[in-house]
Amino acid sequence: MIESTLPIGVPLLLLGGAIVTVGAGLVRRSAAWPITLVVLVLSALVSVRQLLVVLAEGPLTHRLGGWPPPIGIEFAVDGLSAFVTSVVVVIALLVLLYARDAVRRETPEEEVPFFALLQVLLLGLTGMVLTGDLFNLYVFFEISSLAGYALVGLGSREAPVSAFRYLLLGSLGASFYLMGVGYLYVLTGSLNMADVASILPGLIGNPTLTIAMTMMVAGLSLKMALFPLHGWLPDAYTYASSTATAVIAPIMTKVSAYVLIRVLFFVCDPALRATIPVGSTVAWLAATGIVVGSVMAIAQSDVKRMLAYSSVAQVAYIGVGIGLGTPFALIGATLHILSHATMKSCLFLVTGSVQLQTGRRSLHSYEGLGRVMPWTFAGFTLAALAMIGIPPTAGFFSKWYLVLGGINAGEWPIVLIVVASSLLTAGYFFRLMEKIYANPSPSLKANDPGMLARISIMALGAGVLVLGVANFWFVGEVLQPALPATLRLTGM
Amino acid sequence: MKLKTPDRRGWIFAGITGGAAVLLPYIVHVEHHFRWDSIPGFYALYGGLGCALIVLFSKALGASFLQKSESWYGEDVGDDR
Amino acid sequence: MRNRLTVTSLLTLPLLVSAAAAPALASATATAHQVATAHPQTIDFPAIGGTLSGIAAIPTALIFLAGAILIALLPRSIRSTAMPLVPVAALAHIATQLYPATSAIGSDLAAVVRLDFMAYQLEIVHADRLSLLFGSIFSLIGVIAGIYAWHNRDTRQQIAALLYTGGAVGVTFAGDLFTLYAFWELMAVASVILIWTRGTRDAARAGNRYILVHLAGGAVLLAGILLHAADSGSILFRHFDPFHHTTAGWLILTGFCLNAAVPPLGAWLPDAYPRATITGAIFMSSLTTKTAVYALLRGFAGWEILVPLGVMMALYGVVYAVLANDIRELLAYHIISQVGYMVAGAGMGTEMAVNGAAAHAVCHILYKSLLFMGAGVVIATTGRRKLTELGGFVHRQKLAFGLYMIGAFSISGFPLFNGFVSKSMVIAAAGQSHLDWAFLLLTLASVGTFLHTGLKLPYFTWMGEDRGIAPEPAPRNMIAGMAIGAFFCTLLGVAPRLLYVYLPFATSYAPYTPTHLVETIQILLFTLFAFYLFIPKLGGQATISMDTDVLYRKTAPLARIIFVDTPSWIFATIGAASEDLAAAVAHAFRDPTRWIAGDFGPKRPFNVDRSRQPVAVPLALTIAVFALLALASIR
């Protein structure tokens, strides 16, 4: 582990950025967006630099205030966290490009707090990814959650109610996590992840430990919207503003899923995992979630709500991967975190653009839009194909790995569900595509959104392809070295 | 341009060409591969009767349960709307 | 009226010519007997002889993908012209790179390009005689169809068609199942665009059904592939042993058969093809089913079940074609019928059978596209597509009609046209394998084919009742496309050796033997006579036919009720019930002396705001899940 200041670079930038945004915004409202843009560009550069350094030289670490762990807070970055951080920041940057016009039109009065909160949200999320301390993680967890609740609330008329529900449920989840961490502290005397990981094997079988881990899993699962703990998601996504949804939907739940993977697979060892009923219970709940989420998505007539339920289903894929726990399944889950983040943000940007252009969200109002908004729907098509799982998009590969993992684990019903779920996904997407490709009625007046938004959508759409084609590199160079030895693929 | 049912000229024409076709195997050397190859005019009969069989069988099948009205699947199927 | 005689003699002319030629041929071919000696050997596909390198190593499919991107970037005015050039480039690639490379190794070896992927080895290009043959014909038809579609300025269709053809070529050259699957799905996704862009609601729904069925087939295929990979550790696409069936093999076979439109999995074809765009249908009729045929030939040659399936298909298509009213639907059912020959050939598994199936695939692509092009011209120029609404304008569309008839002669197996040289090979292979019943039934299917495609369709479309239809002039490029197709149909018909040298296995089969000619003349002539007599019975009826897709078309509403409305109703009822229960309890305890039963509301349809549970419910659920997990772990 190499000492470096890079790990705290991104959180610091975002923290500073949020403060500056508020300050400048008091003077002049229109300054909020450019400042956020600059901050995010810098953060993206820093995170990419961090990734390159980690790939070249190995994991980085930074001790806050110089205090050594386990007393001090440590930021630990390996290839995987650096990659996830970069993806999170780049997606946020792309959404930001879209956001300039969208925020001005949807929530003009709250432009400054919106962008400031956006940075706070990202601060929390990147902090969660980069930190190496369990309690510090909770702090960032709550920072991101609070920013999330506020962002959701800045939406349509129904938004504050959904935000309130989200707040209640999210707090419950956070509390569970906190209690879990608390019990762990009582047992191990340490809050540092690496430290705890080394102490835990000696405590296997201790009922307190089992409860602690179960609480953490429950708390993170709620934040991740793993079925059946997803109750907050549909409303929150539907009623939040289009930008907020485009940022929260892909990133918030995925970071929580990522943290869950970190906790379960990096902090715990296999023996410990065997004592927590993670394996089959989570896998089965998740498999049910795939089906329920997809079926409910088919039933919706509001496109945003349809995508929200689709997110429930997609997150459930990650849950399946976590539940199965085999090396391939884990690769699938991690890859799906990344691919879903890209796909979903693209899709929500499309629905946002359509809403801004036509003012409506219903399935019916999409009729004929393919002809008048070609660029938007080119991106949409790529993202939709990735969601269904058509090669060579990233969505296909993550499913491929999950299925291989399921076969290895011998869980045939789950394999069947994952393979068949592509059909369900196709069901709700093709309903939409059929409308999009129909002949437009002559009175249809809609255009592609502005250049910036178009760039975002196309970049995200292309990203799905790039991620797919490059997935071998990612799995081989980034993911495998980061995994503990027991979880690596053999014969590589 | 409608083809009318065959009149006398038509029948004569058919008779000549059909007869020639049936007699061809006896003019030209043909190989007998299957056990039915030696039946005179087998393929002619097969063609004519086969045609009749296909038409009648398919029509019967259609009339009994295969054919449905154009709007059987509901909605606006069958019309280019 | 001279018409009758003209028509009749036009039809019988090729027969008379061949009849006259028969004695001449008799002496010339006296020494060339039909091969029927020892028991025909089952095939052995060539082993890998070497690797491709340099430009030859670039998968030909990439040319199509690059072309598709290029089309999007070119100025609108030259897109239509540029489009057929892409498959020309692909043909050039195949001819100058792949053919010489395989010939250099030795004509019965394959050349490959390998790519390592994790634990598996991919073979993204596998060029041998079989794949070169199919790859070439797919590219050629891309050119012809591209010319036919020149007047169509819809860029989406152009891109889709290129991606679709590229996918077909990709599948053909794929040496491993993963690459095959990737291109297989690309084909499905690109081809559905050719249906959706028709723009009508009818087409939209048909496209939906098409893509869902294909994705389902793809899912089965994927399951088979993954199972095979897990069992055997290799993902290479090799021949599956017909004497040792595995579950993975069956799944992959099912996936292939769905794309080949084997009944009962094939109802998507006559559902979708008549509803595709006019120019798109040309691509579709040539590509999806034939790539499936290629895949069957490569992977499942010799699997006996394919023989009865193929024969059944051949007759199935013919029976349904009798009842079809839409001209493209009739042609679509004939695709199923002809593919049946190919499937049966694959099942027989001998060298002659595989040769025959491959030859038939090539010829079928040529004449079927010609037939669809003809039907397309009719629809484009008259706006009508049903037999009950067409007729009486042959004198205004002589050229298109004439070119169509060349395709009709070909599909019917007239001597001098390409169907004669290919269909007969499959049928002869049946004879060679002593499958007499298959021989007879496939011949019967031929009778039906001639009847419908060669006689009924052209008669009722162009001739027959005069309804005063005045077709617009057909665009020149459409006629040009048809002419090129007709040229190839005739070329291969009069010079079959040109085709035979490219077949996977060397063959000395000679179609123009007296025996064969006499047989054919008898069959066709008497079918013609029967047609004459049956004309009144053969006219179209304004009906549709129920096919196996009734299983999902009539049950979809039912599925929605079961899977969507009911759970929603359950959630809504539970939510309402718990609210009411809470209210009732509160009320009861407020005034215990009056225990009033709660008033449960009536059943309500799914309404978001009503069915949203109070926050208490998800909170309770979370705690319950946690408790479940905790209790499960402390046991």
Image (tube, rainbow, N blue to C red):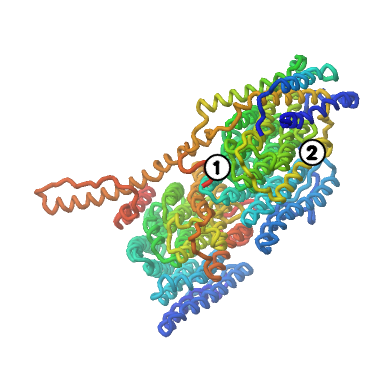
Q: Which mark is residue C173?
A: none
Query: Which chain is disc 2 placed on?
Result: C
| Res C525 visible | yes
**Residue at the location (56% across, 44% down)?**
C210
Few, some or many C-alpha atoms within 10 Å of disc 1 (few <14, some 14-19, many ≥20)?
many
- Mark 2 vs mark 1, foreground winner is 2
Give the residue type that dot 1 points to. Answer: Val
Query: Looking at the picture, does residue C85 appear above or below residue C14?
Result: below
Residue nearest the observer in this picture, A469 or B11:
B11
Q: Is any part of residue C249 visible from this angle? A: no
Quick check: marks 2 and 1 in contact, CB under 8 Å?
no
Q: Chain of mark 1?
A: C
Q: Which residue is label 1 attached to?
A: C213
**Which circle's residue, 2 or 1, is located before the other in the chain?**
1
What is the x, y in percent for residue C70? Answer: 69, 61
User: Which of the 4 quarters of the picture holds residue C172?
Assistant: top right
Q: Secondary structure at mark 1?
A: helix
Residue C570 placement: quadrant: top left
Eyeballing the image, is C630 above or below A466? above
Single out the residue that lies furthest toward the front: C1
Give the residue type that dot 2 points to: Thr
Q: Residue at x 52, y 45 (%)?
A: C202
For the point 42% across and 53% down, which residue is it?
Answer: A301
Q: Which of C513 and A344 lies nearest the eye of the viewer? A: C513
Name the residue nearer the viewer: C58 or C561. Answer: C561
Q: Is residue B73 left or right of residue C384?
A: left
> Mark number for residue C490?
2
How many labels sit on residues? 2
Taking the image as shown, residue C626 lies to the left or right of residue A245, namely left
Residue C369: give x, y in percent of width and height. Answer: 69, 42
Is A257 positioned to the left or the right of C422 in the image? left
Residue C170 placed where, x, y %?
Answer: 69, 49
